[in-house]
Amino acid sequence: PPDNLIMYIADLMEAGYEGIIVVDDGSRDDKQYIFDTLEDGGCRVLHHDKNRGKGVAIKSGLFYYTGKYTGHADGVITVNSEGVDLVEDIDRIAEILHRQKIEGRSNLVKGVRDFESPHITGESIRANTLMTMIFRWIFGARVRDVLCGLRGIPDACVQKCLTFPEKSYAYDCALLIGFIKD
């Protein structure tokens, strides 16, 4: 993880977010101080002995959530460790999840990256453009940012998300397809 993960998580906690789950997906030994600091600060850190990929990391966090928070929260918000997802955007997703729970709805809430940002590479833009066209062609779904890792998963849908294939970044697409088909 990047060194700024500690400050990013501190910003989320300061904004009132509790129950933060961080997955150490087999990170190098010289990065363990980051996870120790986060754990000392109140986060639940799940450790993988080796890198198992993004899909497995997300599902590890979701499994933990089901044992601790199911039925007691509006849902799960996934963010990237780089801290590119703004607290204000996370707040918007949290508000939508809360409103959906009150209204008895359970829709995936997708974030959309700012493709003008210097943090977004040309490779990311090209990959997203291609995936967006594929999703529109195959599923008829208009998704502006297929590959964005910022998402809100309603509490009622977390269990379903554990059934999707977890092969690295393919999990993002499998999760989205699972919600589109419903």
Image (tube, rainbow, N blue to C red):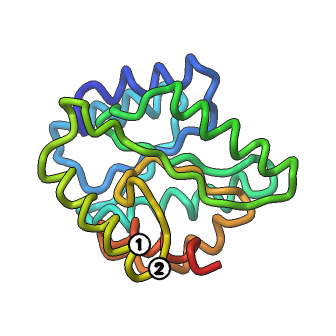
- Is residue 156 placed above or below 81 in the rendered structure? below
Residue 97: x and y, percent? 70, 46
The residue that label 1 is drawn on is 136
Quarter of image, res 134: bottom left
Q: Furthest residue to the top?
A: 14
For the residues marked 2 and 1, what is the alpha-carbon distance in whole angstroms? Answer: 6 Å
Q: Furthest residue to the left?
A: 122
Label 1 crowd (10 A; few <14 / some 14-19 / many >=20): few
Quarter of image, res 67: bottom right
Residue 162: x and y, percent? 55, 73
SS type, badge 1: helix
Q: Amino acid at mark 1?
A: Arg
- Please state which of residues 138 and 61 is positioned toward the viewer in this rendering: 138
Look at the image and tell me in which quarter the C terminus lies: bottom right
Q: Looking at the rendered structure, which numbered label has been put on residue 149?
A: none
Q: Are marks 2 and 1 in contact (CB under 8 Å)?
A: yes
Q: Looking at the rendered structure, which numbered label has been put on residue 139?
A: 2
Residue 37: x and y, percent? 38, 27
Q: Is residue 98 left or right of residue 51?
A: right
